[in-house]
Image (cartoon, rainbow, N blue to C red):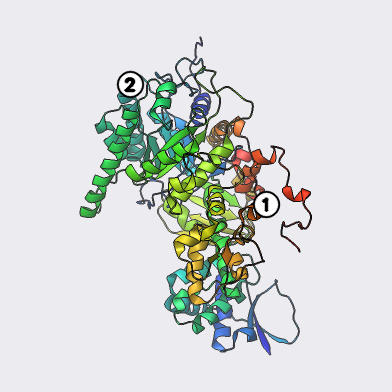
Amino acid sequence: MRIQEALSMYDKLNILTDAAKYDVACTSSGTSRKSDGTGIGSCEQSGICHSFSADGRCISLLKILFTNECIYDCKYCVNRRSNDVARASFTPDEVCTLTMEFYRRNYIEGLFLSSGILRSPDYTMELLYATLYRLRRECNFQGYIHVKAIPGASPELVQRLGFLADRMSVNLELATAESLRALAPHKTRKNILTSMRLVQNRMTENKQELTLYRNAPRFVPAGQSTQMIIGATPETDYQIIQVAESLYQKFELKRVFYSAFVHVNNDAALPAKTGEGPPLLREHRLYQADWLLRYYHFRAEELLTEENPNFNILFDPKCNWALKHLEEFPVEVNRADYKMLLRVPGIGYKSAVRIVKARRLGTLDFADLKKIGVVLKRALYFITCGGRMMYPTKLDEDYITRNLLATGEKLPREVREMGYRQLSLFEGGWNEDGICVQ
Amino acid sequence: MKTVYVCSDTVTGIFSGIYDAWKSRKREEECEIALRGMLDQQLFCDYVEVEETEHKADAVEALIRKHLGMRAYHDIYHAVLSADPKKGDAVLGTMLTAREIPDSTKIMDHLSHPKVEKVFELYRNVFGETHSYKGFLRFRELKNGVLYAGIEPKNQILTCLAPHFADRLPTENWMIHDKTHKMFAVHEAGKQWVILWGDTFDEEVFEQVSDREEEYTRLWKGFCQTIAIESRRNPRCQLQHLPLRYRSEMVEFG
């Protein structure tokens, strides 16, 4: 049992940052807002990263918990009530001062305010509301605010809070209801989805209000997001991206974040500690697949199936898809439609747009593609320019796999450290670039 | 014979050079814009010193806006601020090419042309550096309450950076010091920002910070350390997103 003394600002910030760091979302994108000239702050559509921490994640918002004095006992969470950790709470004033002073110095793009459950969901939401109200109305802060909606809080509070924030998120925590029941006994799937639906409905209504009255207050203009923990429970990648897909379609979420499970507690319900660290590669593959769902017109069942429910560790999901669907290739860059270009490994959505624009003014060859930003060493097996391939290659799954692996580019750390060796070492007739020289 | 127009490394200078080259009605391979001090001497060409005037620059600006459109002007303006010695030439080449295609406003889509591609590449570089500094720039509060930030950019990005901060901090007195190009962007609360040139100033003034400054620096450093998850440590990833050259002025790395 700890007996706590009065904490300094530094200690409080330290405790409540430490408690918030497992939350993934730190994006400041999605709204564009000019300052009105009286307060401070503005928002950029693309978002701005202000720093990067030692784990390589972007620091864009002042990411803190309002309090870590939580009444819940979620087994994966460092702040579960049965853990003996230092506890602290901010006051609304302290959060406002910190945000304003950090913002003036251009340390941050705004505030990310989450919280443990103090007394009850409603009580906690009231505190979050008081903080945001002060920040927006009294300090006249016009920067970015991301706030967590607490599942189980009254709809009226969620609504009031949404008018002060840019983005709101309700954490789904785990992909299936069974897992949630097992690891977070105080949370229910129903409560979480109800809150999500509430935010969604209010956003739809707000869109209508805005078409009628241009200056109507805006409700969560940067949209809603959520996050799932990966690797604490036995779901497959297929289940996870199916959940993500339905969240995008049915709940109109802006983003789904994935968080590789970090072992902070010892609990029988959690997977055993293996010493391998969090499943970062799996998280990475899920983000890649997520991108394909949102920007590349892929569907979840195209990427994975019941029989083959997990991602290939060697290749990104798009490359993997292409290797399994060689009948669609090669694609003629000067003629193929935009959606097909998007499916070529090595062509991103920006390059695809540039290709479509540039080919109106003349035919493109491989040198042009390189300038446009296409990653040729990956794309060359799948495209033709003016009917010709870059090198004579075979449209054969094994052949392409071998060549792509031989270039060794961007193999994830886990794979490199697995003791994997390049196949080309065992075979003659391959030069350094992995291209057949005969 | 080829004519090389030599001008200074400013927007006015380069636009004046383009004005003269444009007026001479030469073809693309017969003229070139070069920057004073960054000149490769070549055989068999005429070197002409450009007389730089605001009038010429305005005329070229109007010409681009009218015929190439605002988007192309936006790209070209950024390209002119770059640190590349061939930038003037790339812009001139782009403008001359624009005359030959049916719809000049589509010129920036013509990426298979080397000069257009060059302008595009320069624009991306300048725009990228501006965007980085929007995040990585750090203000400190001086004794007199002014917010001061020093930066060392490769390109002349002050005129791109200042509007962003003027919008963001309209009620503050602030200044951004471009140490590479010896320029200042200065903003007085509630007024327009201005650009000043000069290297004679009292550097000590910038070192005297207000009393609260140290406390907030300490809080921020603490925050940046705590937010990292130890079991996900990845300095290479950090380095990729935040190159060392930005870190010298960032308090969390001090």
Which residue occupies the foreground of this view, B204 or B110?
B110
Compared with B233, B99 (above or below) is below
- Number of the label disc, if any, that sits on residue B102: none
Counting from the top left corner in percent of width and height, residue A356 is at 48, 68
Marks 2 and 1, how far apart in space?
A: 57 Å
Counting from the top left corner in percent of width and height, residue B205 is at 60, 47
Mark 1 lies on residue: A402
Would you say B153 lies left or right of A109 here? Answer: right
Chain of the residue that carries numbered disc 1 in the rendered image: A
Would you say B97 lies left or right of A389 here? Answer: left
Q: Residue at x 48, y 24 (%)?
A: A77
Counting from the top left corner in percent of width and height, residue A263 is at 56, 25
Chain of the residue that carries numbered disc 2 in the rendered image: A
Total count of labels: 2
Compared with B237, B2 (above or below) is below
Q: Which residue type does callout 1 highlight?
A: Arg
Q: Residue at x 67, y 87 (%)?
A: B2
- Number of the label disc, if any, that sits on residue A120: 2
Compared with A247, A333 (above or below) is below
Residue A116 visible in image: no
Q: Could you classify mark 2 by the number of other residues whose Cα lies within 10 Å: few (under 14), some (14-19), or many (20 or more)?
A: some
Q: Which element type, helix, strand or loop, lies under badge 1?
A: helix
Q: Residue at x 72, y 57 (%)?
A: A433
* Quadrant where the C terminus of chain A is found in the figure: bottom right
Q: Which element type, helix, strand or loop, lies under badge 2?
A: loop
Lower sequence index among marks 2 and 1: 2
Q: Could you classify mark 1 by the number of other residues whose Cα lies within 10 Å: few (under 14), some (14-19), or many (20 or more)?
A: some
Would you say A264 lies left or right of B37 here? Answer: left
Q: Nearer the viewer, mark 2 or mark 1?
A: 1
Q: Which residue type does callout 2 highlight?
A: Ser
Counting from the top left corner in percent of width and height, residue A43 is at 41, 49
